[in-house]
Amino acid sequence: EDQVTQSPEALRLQEGESSSLNCSYTVSGLRGLFWYRQDPGKGPEFLFTLYSAGEEKEKERLKATLTKKESFLHITAPKPEDSATYLCAVQALWGDYKLSFGAGTTVTVRA
Amino acid sequence: KAGVTQTPRYLIKTRGQQVTLSCSPISGHRSVSWYQQTPGQGLQFLFEYFSETQRNKGNFPGRFSGRQFSNSRSEMNVSTLELGDSALYLCASSLWQTNTEAFFGQGTRLTVV
């Protein structure tokens, strides 16, 4: 069974205070690791897909990295509009194509 | 281009009733997956449809079912509703089954009373 653990559960940051979110995963062969952002009452918004260890992707103040056992989402100089729940999901290489999600990290950025 | 559209956005149903939710994927996308999101369990996979066929199913009772039409639009149905079925139901659309970029709709908030 694929497992995804995200930490911390919640993160409170001051505007401009950079930080990182962690996503640890266990999967029998990784097809892809996904990061989503979810605002309250809305569906998850796709951010990144990472496929292999060492891969990095960036989008504005967000940078995602991948190792063989975990992924990090780095938030550089966050702004209040970066406040959201960030979800990590994995898709296994074999079997069905479902996404297995972590519980998420809720980020609050204060001005 | 238009995103994933789910209707209705909100529903209130009574225990024992049944409900049908609709999802229109992004134009050209052929795979539609459904997820249930609750505060306690997070996002859980319900099932996935590709080319009008259910390809995969999660660990949910048979009361949860779905279908996909030739235009890739999908519906999911929940019969004999229980209080525990109250959740945000999300539909994700992707070009192929591999879900390398899956885009979610806004969801349908179902409340069972």
Image (cartoon, coloured by chain):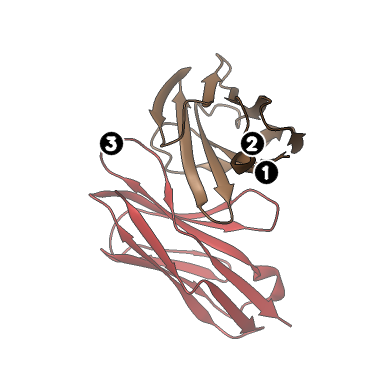
Chain colours: A red, B brown
Q: Chain of mark 2?
A: B
Marks 3, 2 in one chain: no
Of residues B21 and B39, which is closer to you in this image?
A: B39
Q: CA distance from mark 3 to mark 2?
A: 26 Å
In the image, residue A26 above or below residue B54:
below
Marks 3, 1 in one chain: no
Q: Quadrant of residue B80?
A: top right
- Of the two numbered discs 3 and 2 in the rendering, the one whose residue sits closer to the viewer: 3
Q: Quadrant of residue B13?
A: top right
In the image, residue A89 above or below residue B59:
below
What SS does tag 2 mark? loop
Which of the numbered marks, if any, corresponds to residue B4? 2
* Mark 2 or mark 1, earlier in chain: 2
Q: CA distance from mark 2 to mark 1?
A: 8 Å
Which of the numbered marks, if any, corresponds to residue B106? 1
User: In the image, residue B86 lies at what x, y percent?
Assistant: 64, 42
Left/right of residue A85 with respect to residue A64 in the rendered view: right
Kindly identify the amino acid type of the residue bearing the numbered disc 1: Gln
CB within 8 Å, label 2 to label 1 = yes
Kindly identify the amino acid type of the residue bearing the numbered disc 3: Gly
Q: Residues within 10 Å of mark 2 (few under 14, many from 20)?
A: many
Kindly identify the amino acid type of the residue bearing the numbered disc 2: Val
Q: Residue at x 48, y 17 (%)?
A: B52
In the image, residue B52 above or below residue A87:
above
What SS does tag 3 mark? loop
What SS does tag 1 mark? loop
Q: Residue at x 62, y 77 (%)?
A: A78
Q: Chain of mark 1?
A: B
User: In the image, residue B96 lies at what x, y percent?
Assistant: 43, 31
Q: CA distance from mark 3 to mark 1?
A: 28 Å
User: In the image, residue A3 lies at what x, y percent?
Assistant: 34, 56
Q: Residues within 10 Å of mark 3 (few under 14, many from 20)?
A: few
